[in-house]
Amino acid sequence: MAVIAFGPSLASAQVWVEGIVAVVGEGAPGVDSNSRSASVILLSDVELRARMRLLRERPGRPHVGALPRGLLRATLTELVGETLIEREAIRVGMGRVSSDARAEALRALYDLAGGEESLRVLTRALEISDEEIRRIALRRARVAAFLQSNLGDETVTEEELRRVYDSAQHPFLGQSFEDARELLRVWLSRDRIARSIAAWVTSLAERSSIRYPTELRPEGVASDGSDLNAEE
């Protein structure tokens, strides 16, 4: 049961809701993400995503026991990033996505969990509805559409490939340049995309309110979302 205690304004509202591990944005929490109300992330959301990742390693055999604290922290960080990007997508008018985009996001969720049937085994075990899975897919579709529209050119040139290959700072040691070329191109492209996404999340987090009402929060982050390691 939720108990919400409002201060002098919505911007200073304190939210105490059992099961909430993060509140993103100002104002009163809303069921659906939008730029005018706060978005909440539940412990059950974090645990579901973490169990999906574990399921990929053991398709059809869901992990229903306790989850490692480090995995929960990393998963919460991932979900906060998704939520920040989804809210920005909605704010700039990119909240509507096509049915094809939703279907693609749903397929990506199946892949994350080791396949459609594998995910269904998990959702049955945890009594997760199909509607909840579709809601997750919608959020990820919005995130994908926003990133596709806003990420820069991720093309990797031949000069970059040769420079990185010669540096030996890559996972393809022992392979010739010709054998490693395309693998290295994919690896560099994914790394560049990951860095771009991280930069977006950092930028959005700096101008958003993020509150963590429990002890579960990213490493080095205070309950109000501030960096505990930042210099005064």
Image (cartoon, rainbow, N blue to C red):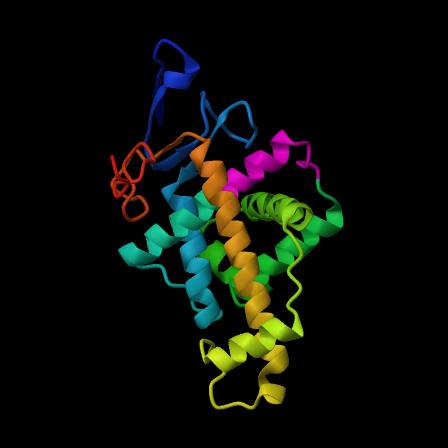
Residue 135: image quadrant is: top right
Question: Residue 113, can we see it?
Answer: yes
Query: In the picture shown, does residue 25 fall above or below 60?
Result: above
Q: Position of residue 161 (x, y in %)?
A: 59, 75
Return the residue nearer the eye: 131 or 197: 197
**Residue at point 55%, 76% (across, down):** 163
- Image quarter where the C terminus lies is top left
Most distant residue in the top direction: 8
Between 102 and 212, which is closer to the camera in this rendering?
212
Whether residue 199 is situated above or below residue 64 in the rendered picture:
above
Residue appearing at x 69%, y 46% in the figure: 149
Q: Give the range drawn in magenta.
A: 82-96
Give the image quarter of residue 132. Answer: top right
- The location of residue 16, given as percent across then percent down, is 32, 26
Q: Is residue 209 or residue 75 the one in the foreground?
A: 209
Name the residue: 46% across, 80% down: 168
What is the magenta segment's predominant secondary structure?
helix
Q: In which quarter of the image is the N terminus?
A: top left
Report if residue 67 is visible in the image: no
Image coordinates of residue 171 in percent, x first then y, are 46, 79
Numbered disc total: 0
| The stretch drawn in magenta includes residue 88 | yes
Does the magenta portion include 179? no
Q: Is residue 2 left or right of residue 127?
A: left
82 shown above or below 179: above
Q: Which residue is drawn at 39% across and 47% down?
A: 76
Q: Is residue 58 above or below residue 218?
A: below
